[in-house]
């Protein structure tokens, strides 16, 4: 399992290539946030795969299915103080 922390310093986003079929989840902390996953196969036209609104701090999003050898971008849009907001993605 891989993990990555989304926070103000990295613009609340992470782009990565998934090496095998997996499920991605967001663990939100600090303040509520909207969580989105995009298929970045065509970087000029990202395709929204999943958007989950207002995930509360301490809660985990519904899993999002990822395909092997595909490029994705995960991001959050925090509703509160961005300096206190962050999320951990796992896949």
Image (tube, rainbow, N blue to C red):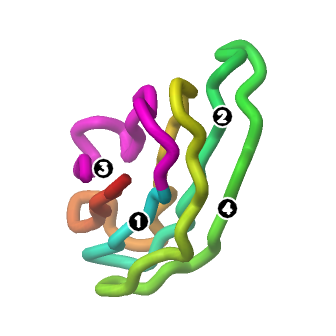
Residue annotated with mark 2: 39
Query: Could you tell me which secondary element the residue under label 4 belongs to?
Result: strand
Question: Residue 18 falls in which quadrant of the image?
Answer: top left
Which region is colored magenta? 1-22
Q: Which residue is mark 4?
A: 51
Q: CA distance from mark 2 to mark 1?
A: 16 Å
Q: For numbered disc 3, what is the local secondary structure?
A: strand
Number of the front mark, 1 or 3: 1
Residue drawn 48% across the image and 45% down it: 74
Tell me the distance, in whole angstroms, between the alpha carbons under discs 2 and 3.
18 Å
- Circles 1 and 3, Cβ within 8 Å, touching? The answer is yes
Which of 49 and 85 lies nearest the eye of the viewer?
Answer: 49
Ranked by sequence position, the earlier of labels 4 and 2 is 2
Which residue does the image show at 38% across and 36% down from the upper left?
14
Q: Residue at x 66, y 34 (%)?
A: 39
Q: Residues within 10 Å of mark 3 (few under 14, many from 20)?
A: many
Cα distance in 3D space between marks 1 and 3: 9 Å
Q: Do the CB atoms of the residues marked 2 and 1 lie less than 8 Å apart?
A: no
**Disc 2 secondary structure class:** strand
Mark closer to the chain start, 1 or 3: 3
The residue singled out by tag 1 in the image is 26
- Along the horizontal axis of the image, is 43 left or right of 9? right
């Amino acid at each position: 399992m891989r993990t990555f922390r989304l926070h103000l310093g990295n613009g609340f986003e992470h782009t990565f290539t998934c090496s095998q079929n997996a499920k991605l989840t967001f663990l939100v902390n600090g303040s509520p946030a909207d969580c989105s996953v995009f298929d970045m196969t065509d970087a000029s036209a990202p395709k929204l795969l999943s958007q989950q609104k207002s995930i509360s701090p301490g809660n985990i999003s519904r899993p999002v299915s990822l395909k092997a050898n595909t490029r994705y971008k995960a991001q959050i849009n925090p509703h509160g103080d961005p300096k206190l907001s962050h999320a951990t993605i796992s896949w």
